[in-house]
Image (cartoon, grey):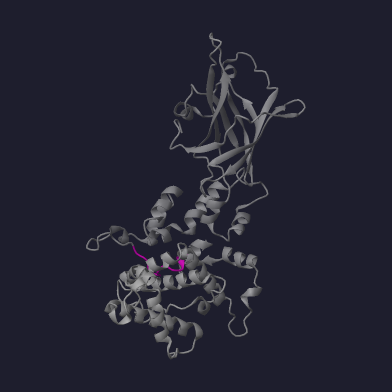
Amino acid sequence: MSAGRSDILAPEQEPVELARFREQWKAEVRERQTATSGVQAQPVPGASTAAERTIPAARSDASAKTATITNTHSSRGPATHVVAGAPAVTTHASHGHSHLSPNLAHAIEVYRKAVFHEQHSQLDEALRLYRQAFRLDANVDRAYFIEEQRTHERSAAQPPSHKKAPSTVSVDEVTRDVQKLEVHKDSKDKSIVTSGFLAQVLKNFPENLVFQPENEKEGLPINLIPDELVLQILRILDYTTIERFAAVSRKARMLSLDSAIWRDFVHLAYKPPQIADNESITNIMELYNSDYRRAYIEHPRLRMDGVYIAVCHYMRMGSSENAWVNVTHLITYHRYLRFFPNGQVLSLLANEEWQPQTVIPMLKPSLRMKGFYIGNWSLSGSTVYITNLVEKHLSHAHATTEPQPNRYFFQMTLALRSRPLGRWNKLDFIGYDSVNVEDGEAVPLPLRNERSFWFSKVKSWPGY
C-alpha cells in the first residue's frame, strides 16, 4: 500500500457487506449475460481475480456509488431475488426491442416485471421496480404501452395454419368491420342493438344483470319491478334523463339501450324539414347499422326544446366635451332563433335593454316588436337554410289600413355543430343576405360583429 493512497483499503480489510454486495452484483451481471446469449454461463478462470484487482484501483469512485446502488438493489433484499412466475429481466434483444436504446429497453423490462408484481398484489416489490424503471427512463410508461401494443399486433398478425394473413387486410376494411359490429344482448327478443365501441364494451357484461344495493344487507325494491315495466317508464322520459339513469349501473345501461326507446326519439325528430323530402328514416338507419341510439346522437338535428342565442358586441365612438378625452361605448345585442317542427322559425334582434330572461318567454309567433322576423327553415346535412324572414313589427298589429308588402326579406345560412357529441347546440354563420322581393337579388350583409348561436334549453313556454 503506497503512502499516497492511504485511504484505500486492502481487499482483506474491506467490510463484509461490501464484499457480499460485490459478489451479488457479479452474479447478476453473469445472469444477464447468460440470458442474452441463451447459453449457460461458464465461470471464467481468473475473472474474479481480475475484478478484485480492478476494484482497489477505483475504490474511491466505487465507494461513492455504493450508497446509491445499495438503495436501489438492497433496500428490500438481494437484486437477484425473483418471485416464482415473474418475467425475468432480460436484454432488449430477447423481446424484439432492437429499435430502442439499451437503456430504454432495460427500463421497459423492469417496468414489465413491476406490472407483474402489482397484478399479484406484491406492491412493495412493484413499487421498488417502478421507481427503478422511472430512474432509468422518465417516459418508460409510455414506451411500455407502445411496446405492448406492438407485441399484441405482431401476435395477432401471425396467421394460423393456412388462413389468410391479416397483413393483406387494409385499414379501411378493419375500420368498416368495426363500424358494422352489432351486438344483440337480449337473446329473447333481440331488442338491444349497439355498434362501434359500445358493442365491444357490452361483450364483457355478464348475462344475468341485476341492480346491486349499496348496502348488501338491505334489499332493492327496483329489482321487484319487471324489466318491461321499467322500459315503459323510460319511454316517457327525455333522453337526458335516460342517459343519467344509464350511468347508475350496468343493468341500467342495458335497459336504456332498448331499441324501442330510441326508435321513438328518432321517429319524432327526423321528419321534414329536419330531413330532406327524398330522405327517409330507413336511409338514415342504414348509415348507423340499425342502431337507433347512435343515429339519434350522431345524425344532425335542430333542437326544438329551447332557443339558440347569439351574444354580439361592437364598439361605437361617443362624443365628449373635452378634446383630450375619447369616449368609446361597448354595445351589446342579442340574436334569438327559435325553430318549430312545422318548418317555421322566429328570429329576433334585441338590444341590451331586453335581457334573455325577459325575451325568451315572449318569443312566440304572436309577438310583435321591432327586430322580430318570421320565416321558414330546412336542414340539409349539417347546413341550416333560413329563408323568407319577414319583419313583424308593432305597426302591423295596430294598422287601420292594409299593411304595405315588404320590399325585402332576409335569409341566413348556418352550420350546425355539436359540442360535445350529441348536443347539436351551436350554429355558426355562413351567410346572411338581404333579398329584393321584386328581382330576387341577394346582397350579402357584413358578419363582422356576428357571433355563433348557442342553444339554451327552455323547460316550458307560457301559454303552451
Instruction: Give me the residue at 52% from left, 29% from top.
Output: 364
Q: Nearer the viewer, residue 280 or 381?
A: 381
Q: Nearer the viewer, residue 24 or 399?
A: 24
Quadrant of the frame with the N terminus: bottom left
Instruction: Give me the residue at 66% from left, 29% from top.
Output: 446
* Main secondary structure of the magenta stretch: loop
Q: Position of residue 404 (x, y in %)?
A: 67, 18
Q: Indicate whether 146 appears above or below 308.
A: below
Looking at the image, the residue that sits furthest to the top is 321
Q: Position of residue 412 (x, y in %)?
A: 65, 34
Looking at the image, the residue that sits furthest to the front is 3
The stretch of residues the image draws in magenta is: 201-210
Q: Indicate whether 123 appears above or below 164.
A: above
Instruction: Locate residue 426 relative to residue 135 in the image: left or right.
Output: right
Instruction: Locate residue 195 relative to residue 256 in the image: left or right.
Output: right
Looking at the image, the residue that sits furthest to the right is 439
Q: Position of residue 218 (x, y in %)?
A: 23, 61
Does residue 207 show up magenta in the picture?
Answer: yes
Q: Is residue 82 visible?
A: no
Instruction: Locate residue 427 relative to residue 256 in the image: left or right.
Output: right
Looking at the image, the residue that sits furthest to the left is 217
Does residue 7 show up magenta in the picture?
Answer: no
Q: Indicate whether 203 appears above or below 233.
A: below
Res 411 quadrant in image: top right
Instruction: Give me the residue at 66% from left, 46% from top.
Output: 277
Q: Is residue 381 visible?
A: yes
Q: Position of residue 332 (x, y in %)?
A: 52, 25
